[in-house]
Amino acid sequence: MISIQNVSKWYGDFQVLSDCSTEVQKGEVVVVCGPSGSGKSTLIKCVNGLEPFQAGTIVVNGTSVGAPKTDLPKLRSRVGMVFQHFELFPHLSITDNLTLAQRKVLGRKEDEARTKGLALLDRVGLSAHAAKFPGQLSGGQQQRVAIARALAMDPIAMLFDEPTSALDPEMINEVLDVMVELAREGMTMMVVTHEMGFARKVANRVIFMDRGAIVEDAAKDEFFGSPRSERAQAFLSKILSH
Amino acid sequence: MDFTQVIQAFPSLGNGLLLTLELTVLAVIGGVIIGTALALARLSSIRVLSWLAGFYVNYFRSIPLLLVITWFYFIVPFMVGWVTGTNQPIGAFTSCLIAFMMFEAAYFCEIVRAGIQSISKGQVNAAYALGMTYPQAMRLVVLPLAFRKMTPLLLQQSIILFQDTSLVYAVGMMDFLNVARSQGDITGELHTFLLFAGLVYFVISFGASTLVKRLQKRLTV
């Protein structure tokens, strides 16, 4: 579904990604972790072309992301993305947030988009808030709306860029619960996160990145049981020790 | 001081005020539209476009408004005639309106540009991630948010424009101030009429400015 081959990226002289390669199969949940500044967010943003890269190829569902002739908007409309800071549109009601792209990008009819949006809002447990504006919701609620907004586009895969990093601790679980459910339904997911509990529960594979490179790419049990690289061991002991 | 003269001149003063307001409103609308187009051009990745828009803005911000008004008064009829191929006179109102729109567009451009730049990259990315094209992201997300933020500044600039419309006296238009001045001349009560005109400008400008401040407080909450 998502194939990343030898991807490198530079900001001027500074190399942020070096020779990253991995695959995400259909229905697979892959967690990307690593210390901050290791390039995980940059890598996931390359997958839907929000960040350009200078070398290598990324192919999503048969479409090459970096190719000059690729219709990026069309590709992105089929790949959902959830951001660290939610990024709901503050000038639109929750309902409008859920229907805007359905109508303008996919060309769905007003009531079709609304029915779809409200059904997904109900699924994330927020149907009571349809008429509110993003500023009136808590962080956890906003992030659940953001997930519903992405799902409304019927994505073939979902990208999560540190979806719980900006949340207060008591709100993290409500978002993770939605993500776990999604994973169990068979959604293809690539998740940048520090939530190792989530990784243990639903990930098929864990990728560990450091200084722009993929240091470890292993099945979940292998990663948590016996990480091969020293850096992954050090990282794991740091975040799992308390 | 004989204010009865002023009261008697109310119909013609009213006409003058109407012209002033009409000029202000239309110039603001046109100026904001042209200004937004200029701002998009200035922020464009196409070098030539951004250079041209930058030159336009810097040029109009470097010359006096009075010069633009008189200059357009002579050149606009010629240009319109050249474009349409006819020789019809177009009148001072149209030429002044075009002068104001184009002059103010340079100032509105800078306000809109700052507004667009104040929208976070995350919002733009969210729009793109949902499959929006650049024009869609601008129209549906960035510009609505930017205009929300810059409404107070745009209104403040519009109040300045309202005062600046008095410069149309230079091409003989009977705006509010010019009517007041000429009525003052005719009746020999120039001071009274100018005092009254000053009061009207103050009430409108200060009133609008107070409203803007209140709006600003509401928008920042």
Image (spheres, coloured by chain):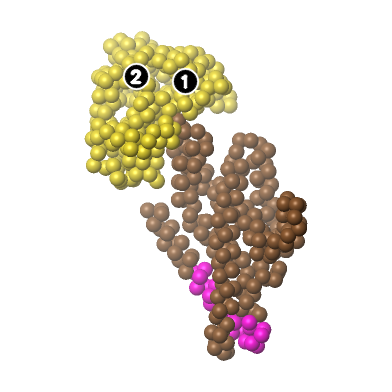
Amino acid type at image mark 1: Gly
- Distance of mark 2 from mark 1, alpha carbons? 24 Å
Q: Compared to A226, does A91 lie above or below? A: below
The magenta segment is B183-206
Indicate the position of residue B44 as horizontal and vertical percent values.
60, 38
Amino acid type at image mark 2: Thr
Indicate the position of residue A191 as horizontal and vertical percent values.
35, 23
Indicate the position of residue B131 as horizontal and vertical percent values.
45, 30
Judging by the rendered image, the residue that carries numbered circle 2 is: A188
Which mark is nearer the camera, 2 or 1? 2
Q: Nearer the viewer, residue B194 or A34?
A: B194
| Chain of the residue that carries numbered disc 2 in the rendered image | A
Chain rendered yellow: A
Image quarter of the N terminus of chain A:
top left
Q: Is residue B63 magenta?
A: no
Q: Are the residues flagged by discs 2 and 1 from a single subunit?
A: yes
Q: Compared to B104, does A83 lie above or below? A: above
Judging by the rendered image, the residue that carries numbered circle 1 is: A212
Per the rendering, the colour in which chain B appears is brown
Circle 1 packing at 10 Å, graded few (<14), some (14-19), many (20+), is: many
Q: Image point 64% across, 87% down: which residue?
A: B187
Q: Image point 31% across, 14% down: which residue?
A: A204
| Chain of the residue that carries numbered disc 1 in the rendered image | A
